[in-house]
Image: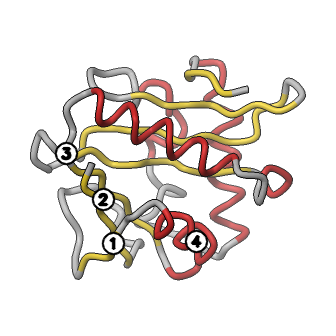
Amino acid sequence: MIRTIVPADDPVLADIVKTTLTEFGMNKQGTAYSDPTTNHISKLFDKPRAIYYVAESEDKIVGGAGIHPLDGGEAHVCELQKMYLIPEARGKGLAGKLISMCLAFAKEHGYTQCYLETSPELARARKVYEQFGFRYLTGPMGNTGHFGCDSWMVKDL
């Protein structure tokens, strides 16, 4: 089941984000691991033209993903953010479903480009983004504060 976030989800989602980043050696400054908004994802996405989807399996939160206006970016650019799944939920098509829902929301809300930041350590995720038509950039867009990510991608919607 996929639903929108509620404040009670925040601690579980923060744990998923931080545990996943630790799993891949990304538990460092300049990533979502040290970003204070990770502890309050529902608050971060409680704004116009933003949404966060929570994935559940057997009444357990297994991950999520969201669309947010790109901080410091142009109004037509959104960012795919906080896309994380627990290990048991990976490889089952759930990431693709979340991305599809996020991109559909973005289009419906007038965005013409979707940006994301990632890292070579997240090779499997990067492959999924490539399959969705995201292309690599030579530098970051906007001002996300995630200087620990060194791969930037964008997709025209």
Q: Which mark is residue 38?
A: none
Q: Which residue is mark 4?
A: 26
What is the quadrant of residue 147 in the picture? bottom left
Give the foreground label among 4 and 3: 3
Q: Which residue is mark 1?
A: 135
Q: Which residue is mark 2?
A: 155
Q: Is residue 60 left or right of residue 19?
A: right
Asked whether the residues under the numbered discs 3 and 2 touch, taking CB atoms below 8 Å apart as contact, a structural biologist would say no
Q: CA distance from mark 3 to mark 1?
A: 14 Å
Q: Residues within 10 Å of mark 2 (few under 14, many from 20)?
A: some
Q: Secondary structure at mark 3?
A: loop
Asked whether the residues under the numbered discs 4 and 2 touch, taking CB atoms below 8 Å apart as contact, a structural biologist would say no
Residue 53, percent from left and from top: 55, 31
Residue 16, percent from left and from top: 70, 47
Q: Quadrant of the N terminus?
A: top right
Q: Which residue is mark 3?
A: 112
Determine whether 7 is above or below 103 in the image: above
Residue plotted at (56% across, 65% down): 128
- At label 2, the amino acid type is Lys
- At label 4, the amino acid type is Met
Give the foreground label among 4 and 2: 2
